[in-house]
Amino acid sequence: MIRRLSLRGVRFNSGATAGLKLSKFDEHYTSIAIDGELHHFKNLFLRDSCTSEASVDPFSRQKLFSTGDITQTLNIIDARVNGDNLEVKWHDGESQSSSTFSKDFLDSHKNLESSLRGKFFHHDRLFWDMKSLKPYLGELQVDCSDYNSTEGFHSTLDNLNRFGLSFINSIPKPAETTMTEENAYSWPVAQLANKFGYIKKTFYGTLFDVKNEKEDAKNIANTNTFLPLHMDLLYYESPPGLQFLHFIENSTEGGENVFSDSFSAVEFVKSEDMAAYEALTKFPITFHYDNNGEYYYYTRPLVVEDPLTGVLQAVNYSPPFQGPFELGTTSDSHQLLFNDFLRGLILFESFVNDPANQYKVKMPEGSCVVFDNRRVLHSRLEFSDANGGDRWLMGCYVDGDSYRSRLRIRSRSS
């Protein structure tokens, strides 16, 4: 049974300096005025956030207790302001402990918006169609030599956060002619990806070739037929956040790449049919890869919202790798949800397949496109090598966690 936090004392206007003023504390809350604005912090939150050496290892920075440990025995003994810090004494079961919380910490945790600042950057995102993207096409281009500088890399980070899309140009030709696992990290695309974080190795390898395999292609991307808009590896439990495609050769007739902002499409569905939008956040779509001795399977909704903020977090759409539906097809138990989902899917597809909402480009040789695989859909038009041209791409993946880590570190320094 969880004990109630005992009332140990009340203190008014104690130690008020430098914009931090203690109003009172009781068995549940400690009330602090930060620059004149009163905020009520749960005592359990404060104790759970303690970073003293008794609570957090000073070297690993890892927590030495669990929230459940302190919940049953926590009592507050005293609280006071000392300069820019709040100092609290606790009774934890049979022992006592102390915590110190800076004004900056309290200010950054006074509400949800403050707590998430510097962790998510959705306010900077620009949802686009071709008309709204066109003025920014120049900004999306980064020269390879500039990419290796701090400023150039940060430009690429900004592009990916704002648009989900960025281009790196003037990449030197690879020294190797055949990719192997042994030489994978010497290839230009691997060196570009390593700026973000560890390359995500998949059953395709550390890197993957995209060539026109005239016979026995194990993936539709390795043919010359039309490749519809999709995202990669949605049959994985954790699909990659970023995809890199380096165009080593691209002299065929046709084969233009097409990109579309799925977040814009989702907002369109939301504005047209809220019930359909809600169904897109709930109805499970099956994604699978069952070929060449591999069988991957995962179900996920088309739309994923952040559980804390409700902000759009990811989209899951990949018709070439979609398996049979498993709800709403043989009984009436989920029929209403299935019908709402179908309306939303039709609206979504009508948006992303409209040329007005697509960016189509014939990628120049020596360029690499980097895109957010959980936001930007990619496609490739049919092509022909009858004129003697060739098409050879080298690609790889990086997890979104590494990309977002780079964004957060960059935010601290700006």
Image (spheres, helix red, strand yellow):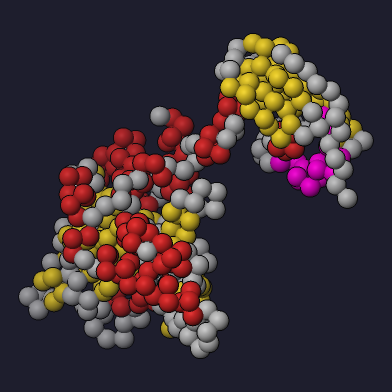
- Left or right: residue 51 versus residue 300 is right
Residue 248 visible in the picture: no
What residue is shown at x 25% (from left), y 78% (from top)?
223
Task: Examine the structure image and report whether residue 90 is included in the region drawn in magenta.
Answer: no
Q: Quadrant of residue 272?
A: bottom left
Residue 158 visible in the picture: yes
Q: Looking at the picture, how far across and down is residue 186, in whole percent?
A: 35, 55
Foreground residue, 346 or 155?
346
Task: Examine the structure image and report whether residue 70 is included in the region drawn in magenta.
Answer: yes
Magenta range is: 63-76
Foreground residue, 70 or 326?
326
Foreground residue, 389 or 117?
117
- Residue 140, compared with residue 213, is above or below; it is above
What residue is shown at x 59% (from left), y 33% (from top)?
109
Q: Looking at the picture, how far across and down is residue 299, in whole percent?
A: 51, 72
- Left or right: residue 399 versus residue 225 is right
